[in-house]
Amino acid sequence: MKKTFITIIIAMASALAFSSCRSQEELNPESIITVDKVQYTPFDLWLQKNYVDTYNIQFKYRYETIEADYNYYTVPANYQNSIILAHLVKYLCLEAYDAAGGIEFTRANFPKLIFCIGDYEYKNNGTIVLGTAEGGRKILLTGVNYLTQYVKNADQLNHFYFKTMHHEFTHILNQTKDMPTSYQFVTPADYVADEWNSAPFNVSSAEDGTGYLQKGFISAYSQNAYTEDFAEILSMYVCYPDSQWNAWLQEADSYDCHGSELISAKLDLVKTYMKDSWGIDLDRLHRTVQDRLGKIAGGQIDLTNIDIN
Amino acid sequence: MKRIIKYALIAAAALSMQSCLFEQKDLFEESSSVRLDKLMESAKATLIGSQDGWLLEMYPEGSQRYGGYAFIMKFDADQQVTVYSEIASKFNVPATSLYKLSSEDGACLTFDTYNEYIHFFSTPNSSRYQAYEGEFEFIVCDVKSDLITLRGTKTLNTMYMRKFSGDPVAYLESVAAEEEAILVSGFKGNVGGKEIVGDIDIDNRQVTVTSGDQTYETAYAIVPGGIRFYEPAADINAISIDIDGNIAITDGASVGTALQAVYPEGYRKYNEFNGKYEFTFWYSATASGAFPCRLTAVGDGTTYRMTGVAGWNADGNYDETNDVYDVILTYSKSKGNLSMLLQNLTKNGEPVMYNNRYVGITPLQATKDGATSGYLSFESNAGVMTVWNGDETNPEYVLKNNGSVAGRNFDAFWVCTYSGPTQTSATRSSGSSLPVNYKFFGKTHLVWKPSLLKKIGD
């Protein structure tokens, strides 16, 4: 009896709860969501053709607060320099990977968003951030307003932009396909984390053999962790000419050290990884990038033409 | 069990008390996004609509501590903005870049490619990692045909774009001229029955107005003929200031009210130096003296003639017929003082020569008593300046290093001769062989510690 009573009450409650308020009004046919009207610049049309249609990569040169890092005071990039940078990235990076690994490789793996800002990101201790790559999706390029000072100088271009891009791109590749485990055992005991930037770890070679080159690291930052080491080997090898690479190897062997063997062993592992995992011949990539850097420095490439026909 | 029934009943009651109220009316006829769209369209049309552009007084930093600066911006339909600014080194060279209106927290006007003027206050560097805390994104709060109200997204400062007409270069030139013309350090007067006192901080473009026990602090921007406040201070929005110290309220509750100029401490007006003086200096390491001379305003607003310096004989008497030169003192309108600077000496405007050489005085930082040796400076603004003791009836002026040459502390002059009109170490010879009437008060060519100009008569 009691059970029935309770059931009835619950049934009534449910019925009341599901009561509807049907309205006679029609829905407003006008959407409350509107889209900002976009006006295109000639450069936008060039980017549409050369970045979006070709690689499905967005190259954002107009400042958007949402893309900027709120921890820094940043400013927009200059329009003319953005055009030059877009040409450089395409010629030195995207098309270099096209040549070495095929365009499908670039399309599938290169980050989908490149965001430019005019000045560097300044920290309160006076140091600056040159560029970052976030989660394999976005690359931030800073200091675009200074670009024209560097265009004719391959070393500066590498230092400020392209070494960073190749370095960060290596991380993205590593996230997709693991790097060889054996890599971390080449110089297992010498990674020093955040101390890489302070003495004695920031010295390339020393009489007592404690320089980073002598210990088998291509750069000071390589000592941070084996993942960084891997990315440094790849990006330094790709970006710098053979003469520079050999000079580093020579310095690695100074004062009876044998750093060059370790660096070469690492480079071999990187080459094998790129070949086996991605089908990319690193030597070919290196030659392509060097050839193209030479042409840029020689002024043989038109970096300002945004004619799309 | 009973308790369950009770709860069930309460639940049922609660559930059954739903309302079907359809009486809620929309406050606006259109949805918020449509209204935002319309605001952006009207903002853009208004921006483009002004042929000569818009005047923006930009205030960086949340407390406006750098003051406001004038920017004249012309917007075109192709997203281009052409900017002239007070901060430019050349007013007639505009900078162009892109702009965009987008929906953020409302309609947002963004200058989204680099413009060397607009982004000046937001461009960081290693010693100023926050730049001047300026910004380049503004929420459009209100659009009228001749006034657009903006709010900075970072600072939340309210700024106005005023419809501009005329020549931007001429406007900026008159702003720069006004900046030069503000010599006063403040103002005072009776406004609407209340005594007010105002202080102007020219370097940071700040103004403080005290009215009764109320104190208002605000920033200002310079406009032709005056300054405009960021916020009203004691009901004053703007005042005019001219180079002669005439000040009046030009915008606010008591427009037209004249205010009295307040000058910086120690400030003297140009015509207040005329009269007979005593000039004190050391003419050797052990001997000093005070000698009479006269200061006469030349009448050009910038120079004074100091007479009676030359023309003394060996007996220590002054002979007017032997007076070969005057010393020219330079009046500074911004500091309200006189300076004795490096110069070639003149008589009635003509350069004074001796044995075909120019006779001049050259400032020196003495390294030996009596100024027998030291460091000469040949910079045109090197010298000493007057510092007033503040006494109106018995004014005295100490002569001090004017600080124009870094690392030099001038405390002496040498009278020298020069082979050409420009003083250099190569053209210089000692003035030791000059005859007595060419020497300072007949005493010496080495003037050590020129220290006091004491007024002794009219």
Image: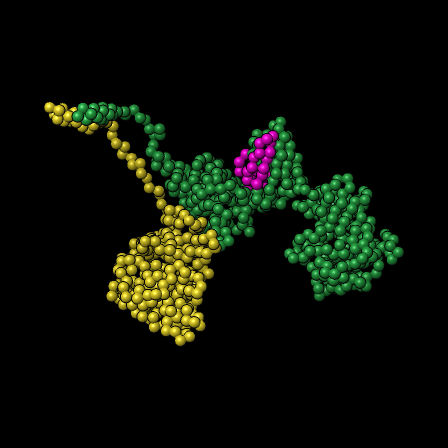
Chain colours: A yellow, B green
The picture places residue B32, in percent across and down from the top left corner, at 35, 34
Q: Which residues are magenta?
A: B206-232
Looking at the image, residue A202 sits to the left or right of residue B206; the answer is: left
The picture places residue B108, in percent across and down from the top left corner, at 41, 41
Instruction: Name the residue at 82% across, 52% down.
Output: B289
The quadrant of the rendering that contains the C terminus of chain B is top right
The picture places residue A28, in percent across and down from the top left corner, at 27, 32
Q: Is residue B212 magenta?
A: yes
Looking at the image, residue A248 sits to the left or right of residue B94; the answer is: left
Looking at the image, residue A32 sits to the left or right of residue B64; the answer is: left
Q: Residue furthest bottom?
A: A256
Q: Is residue A235 visible?
A: no
The quadrant of the rendering that contains the N terminus of chain B is top left
Instruction: Name the residue at 48% across, 46% down.
Output: B133
Relative to A98, residue B51 above or below? above
Q: Is residue B230 magenta?
A: yes
Instruction: Name the residue at 19% across, 26% down.
Output: B4
Instruction: Name the residue at 37% across, 46% down.
Output: A66
The quarter of the picture where residue B178 lies is top right
